[in-house]
Image (tube, grey):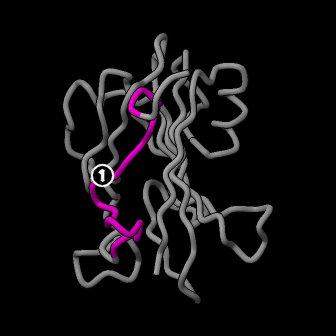
Amino acid sequence: MANASDEFRVASSGIDHEGRLPRKYTAEGQGTKKDISPPLEWYNVPNGTKTLAVVVEDIDTSNPSVPYTSWVVINIPSTLKGLPEGFSGKEEDKGEDYANIKEGNNDFKALGWSGPKMPSPGHQFEFKLYALDVEIDVGNKVTKEKLLDAIDGHVLGEAVLTAIYQ
């Protein structure tokens, strides 16, 4: 049995030690300190992984069977160890390592990260990282649904991080 330090996992230095998602990553931050995508790091990527994909969802929506998607990212090279804070929506050249990464549309009908704005506090956000044995091609418009269909049978590992928006 593998010990916890060998597990495929996702983490974020941006989420505080109590598991809270700070305001700057939400739609309720102040001024330019809002709607910044949080940093993500991952560890122990499974052997054979070609790309990684991220899906972030609010799992405490009014309809629990339909989580609200905040961010979709596909074709992250397995050589990367994470995504930096503020990665989403940056148009400038991020370098060769980032060339094939695509952000998808979230449930706010916007491209990239859209931070939460909640009518009530305490919502949980699930950051799901998929290790895949392929590069994903879902056409020009990337959505969570297209991603999940495309990765069927190609998932080598899944890691989850939950943060609370208060």
Residue 122 lies, with reference to residue 6, above or below; the image says below
Q: Main secondary structure of the magenta part?
A: loop
Apparent side of residue 37 relative to residue 155 in the rendered image (left or right)? left
Residue 90 lies, with reference to residue 96, above or below; the image says below
Across and down, in percent, residue 77 comes to 37, 24
Q: Residue shown at 41%/77% (left/top)?
A: 27
Q: How many marks?
A: 1
- Residue on which the image places disc 1: 39
Residue toward you, 36 or 166: 166
User: Is 6 part of what is drawn in magenta?
Assistant: yes
Q: Residue shown at 29%/50% (left/top)?
A: 87
Residue toward you, 59 or 51: 59
Q: Which residues are magenta?
A: 5-22
Circle 1: is it few (<14), some (14-19), or many (20+) Cα within 10 Å?
Answer: some
Across and down, in percent, residue 35 comes to 35, 69
Residue 164 lies, with reference to residue 7, above or below; the image says below
Across and down, in percent, residue 81 comes to 29, 32
User: Is 54 part of what is drawn in magenta?
Assistant: no
Q: Residue shown at 34%/73% (left/top)?
A: 22
Q: Quadrant of residue 112?
A: bottom left
Residue 120 lies, with reference to residue 101, above or below; the image says below
Element carrying mark 1: loop
Q: Label 1 is placed on what type of residue?
A: Pro
Apparent side of residue 73 relative to residue 120 in the rendered image (left or right)? left
Apparent side of residue 132 relative to residue 103 in the rendered image (left or right)? right
